[in-house]
Image (cartoon, coloured by chain):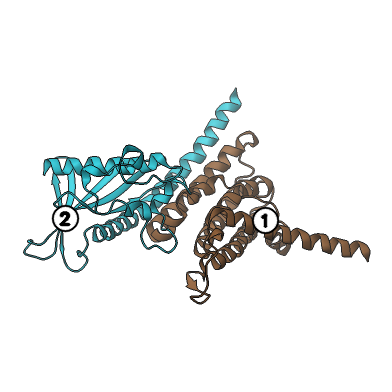
Amino acid sequence: MSVGKEFIKGMVRENPVFRLLLGLCPVLATSSSVMNAIGMGVSVIFVLVASNTLVSLLRNFIPPKIRIPIYISIIATFVTVVDLIMAGFFPDLHKSLGMFIKLIVVNCIILGRAEAFASKNNTFYAIIDGLGMGIGFTFSMIIIATIRELLGNGTWLNMPVFGTQFEPVLIFVLAPGAFITLGFIIGGMNWLDHRRAAIATKS
Amino acid sequence: MKEIFKFALVLGLVTGIAACALGVVNQITQPRIALQQQLALNAGLYRVLPGSENGCIIEQHLDGLNMYYTGYLNRDTTDFIGYALPVESKGYSSTIRTLVGLDSLRNIISLKILFQQETPGLGTKCEEVRPGETEPWFQYQFKGLFVPDVALDKNGGSIHCITGATITSAAITDAVKESSVKLFSEL
């Protein structure tokens, strides 16, 4: 097990959004602007690293039969911390992310990493895994949000990109745009994979 | 049997520690959150009492069960702008807090939703600003309405329901009307 490998796997090979298809609800709902994507991503990184750390530290203490309620309690605690801090210090972001911050509790990535990784590995690797997965999640969110905000609103991080002539393609900031964007990205990644595999078998 | 006590103890311990930690975080963030709510309320008051942002007087009144604000344009309190009435209503998944600006002739000056956590994509459209417009369309519909005429379109009024969010629409509309009528009957 190498540190670099555990860290990098969340970016491409085991990317939570494009590869594991986990936590898609907040991805689809809050990727309409890059600002929201960053806010959501940073919240997920914090909760993921914190819960991975604690689950890994307590892994010999948690009775296996009640591990899920304990994981959920730990995750819910950190999510509430994020929610309170955001409400106090970033009210606008808190308003636009709304319910989705609280819904991080049921985000499959976090429970998934606690169950599949943190509960079986030492704390150092659990933190690296949480960071890698969290950054991979944020990175994917920013990609989707960039496409959606550019096409659907003509802006990037609220800065106008195209001239006044640009007519925004509204559908991209609406819900169907999220599905379309995500579908094309996953399709593109699979196509690249198949091509690479085909070339490998030929040679 | 012994196992179950062990489980209860462990789970109790974990949630107990979590509760303590949250208590501490709450202590720290509470003043900030209260400040943010005050700022949002002030912004709302300026919004529903137009002209009030340039050095006007807004006073809070408490009489009996009613709490409302009055806005005057200048210090000698002759130029009356109107009343601002905070309204709370039980929506579909949250308590919706609204601020209504009313003039002395019982017309709604404007309406501002201060807080809601309704269903994303449905009830949250009560704050949706349509592309190319500057104001949330649902709230804009209340502008200039005579208080007794406030009603949803299916009840013979002029307020268009939010598609898929009848409960949210009705909660806001009914509470705004009820509270405003009550305020004027007791003034």
- Looking at the image, is B32 positioned above or below residue B62? below
- Residue at 76% over, 58% down: A190
Q: Is residue B90 left or right of residue A149?
A: left
Measuring from the top left, give residue B101's x and y in whole percent: 22, 53
Q: Residue furthest top?
A: B1
Which residue sits furthest bottom? A163
Q: Chain of mark 2?
A: B
Q: Is residue A10 visible?
A: no
The one of A71 and A9 positioned closer to us in this rendering: A9
Choose between A57 and B128: the one closer to the eye: B128
Marker count (numbered): 2
Three-letter amino acid code at the position of disc 1: Gly
On the image, numbered disc 2 is attached to which residue? B82
The residue located at (50%, 64%) in the rendering is A35
Figure chain in cyan? B
Chain letter of mark 1 equals: A
**Residue A176 place in picture, x, y as percent:** 58, 53
Mark 2 lies on a secondary structure that is strand
Q: Which image quadrant is residue A46 in?
A: bottom right
Classify the position of the N terminus of chain B by image quarter.
Answer: top right
- Give the quadrant of residue A88: bottom left
Using the image as rendered, state which of residue A54 and residue A102 is in the foreground: A102
Residue B85: numbered disc: none
Residue A183: which disc? Answer: 1
Chain shaded brown: A
Q: Amino acid at mark 2?
A: Gly
Q: Residues within 10 Å of mark 2 (few under 14, many from 20)?
A: many
Percent of width and height locating residue B135 = 35, 60
Asked which quadrant contains residue B93, the reply is: top left
Give the secondary structure at mark 1.
Answer: helix
Q: Residue at x 39, y 47 (%)?
A: B23
